[in-house]
Image (tube, rainbow, N blue to C red):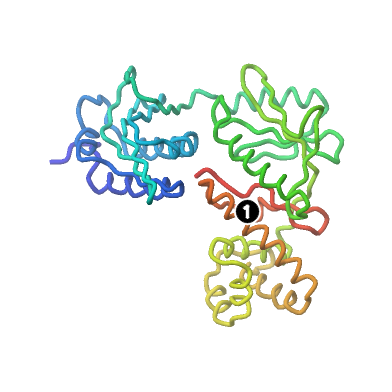
């Protein structure tokens, strides 16, 4: 008889598939041992371990320590969540000929778990909301105006021509957000002549500065001031289409698809949503393509923009990031679309 709150084999298999798919982006296969299955419902855990807690653990470990773990040789280590007191000792098997293996040997809920092996710790001790409010007050008193906020950052301006982007830590050491932004920064800097990527502004010493306020570490980035896309514009609907295709094919494949009646028939039947005026984005994108196809110069610009998106997708994918380029993460410099936030850790 299944105990109340006990994780069933079906639920645990679903968690294992989730973890395996997520970590597979880093070339790592995740596997639970038989002992792990037995121990997850052990009464010695006190409070039952839930599937949601396991998913949180593997998501947090992937975001904060995934790349470091994926570089391990054959070793034993421990994943530790200080919020839930869940500990997962694991064996990491380095496989030069294929995917590495992360084998979860066992699991236990224990606050003072001790081990001589390396520990990869996650927690939620950092209070982002309080830190963001404190930092916001300081910036406002210094004459800055808040322009917006995303999952990982807030954006401010003082002169109306440039912006300051403050990378907000996912944890007190900025592991998640900072690593991803640095990767995007170096991607842009290595392609500094590309018009579809943002330009950075130097502070006193550099374009990226670290600072500390009330014991919390932040990253401050100087950037050009860009404008939001007009979400009603036909070009915006077309960018939305391209951002989906970029994970599947290069421009030659895109062009072949866009000139196919079958592609548009299948695409128009999806109807993802509606735009102002009772139009749907599929139809708007189709009409925009009909005009674009007749203008070789604009078509060439669109191809260059798509090639940049494709380059950005492949670069982030190689680093283990998920593609997250939607029309809120594209801005514009005049009429030129600019990619500003293309990836996510999850």
Q: Is residue 219 above or below residue 93?
A: above
In the image, taking residue 190 as reference, residue 334 lies left or right, namely right
Label 1: state its secondary structure. Answer: helix
Residue at position x 30%, y 37% from top?
A: 104
Residue at position x 56%, y 52% from top?
A: 323
- Residue 244, x across and y down, in percent: 57, 62
- Residue 346, x across and y down, in percent: 49, 45
In the image, taking residue 316 as reference, residue 332 lies left or right, namely right
Q: Residues within 10 Å of mark 1 (few under 14, many from 20)?
A: many
Q: Residue furthest left?
A: 1
Residue at position x 59%, y 62% from top?
A: 246
Q: Quadrant of the N terminus?
A: top left
- The residue closer to the viewer here, 63 or 11, is 63
- The residue closer to the viewer here, 238 or 198, is 198
Q: Which residue is mark 1?
A: 312
- The residue closer to the viewer here, 230 or 181, is 181
Q: Is residue 73 above or below residue 17?
A: above
Q: Is residue 184 above or below residue 207?
A: below
Residue at position x 79%, y 38% from top?
A: 163
- The residue closer to the viewer here, 72 or 213, is 72
- Residue 226, x across and y down, in percent: 78, 47
Q: Is residue 82 above or below residue 231?
A: above
């Amino acid at each position: 008889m299944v105990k109340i709150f006990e994780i069933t084999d079906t639920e645990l298999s679903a968690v294992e598939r989730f973890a395996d798919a997520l970590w597979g982006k880093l070339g790592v296969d995740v596997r639970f041992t038989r002992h792990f299955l037995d121990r997850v419902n052990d009464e010695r855990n006190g409070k039952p371990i839930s599937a949601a807690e396991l998913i949180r653990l593997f998501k947090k470990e992937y975001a904060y320590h995934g790349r470091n773990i994926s570089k391990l040789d054959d070793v034993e280590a421990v994943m530790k969540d200080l919020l839930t007191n869940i500990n997962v000792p694991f064996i990491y098997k380095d496989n030069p000929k294929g995917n590495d293996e992360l084998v979860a040997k066992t699991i236990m809920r224990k606050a003072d778990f001790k081990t001589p092996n390396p520990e990869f710790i996650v927690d939620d001790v950092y209070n982002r909301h309080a830190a963001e409010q404190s930092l916001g007050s300081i910036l406002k008193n210094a004459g800055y105006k808040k322009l917006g906020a995303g999952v990982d950052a807030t954006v401010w301006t003082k002169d109306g021509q440039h912006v300051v982007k403050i990378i907000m830590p996912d944890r007190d050491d900025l592991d998640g957000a900072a690593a991803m932004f640095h990767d995007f920064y170096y991607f842009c800097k290595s392609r500094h002549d590309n018009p579809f990527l943002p330009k950075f502004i130097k502070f006193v010493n550099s374009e990226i500065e670290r600072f500390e306020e009330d014991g919390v570490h932040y990253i401050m980035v100087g950037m050009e001031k860009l404008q939001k896309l007009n979400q009603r514009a036909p070009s915006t609907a077309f960018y939305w289409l391209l951002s989906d295709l970029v994970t599947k094919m290069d421009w030659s494949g895109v062009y072949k698809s866009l000139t196919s009646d079958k592609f548009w028939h299948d695409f128009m039947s999806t109807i993802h949503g509606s735009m102002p005026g009772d139009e749907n984005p599929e139809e708007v994108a189709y009409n925009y393509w009909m005009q674009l196809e007749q203008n070789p110069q604009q078509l060439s610009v669109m191809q260059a923009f798509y090639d940049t998106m494709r380059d950005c997708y492949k670069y982030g994918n190689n680093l283990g990031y998920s593609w997250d380029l939607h029309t809120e993460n594209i801005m514009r410099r005049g009429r030129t679309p600019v990619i500003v936030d293309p990836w996510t850790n999850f």
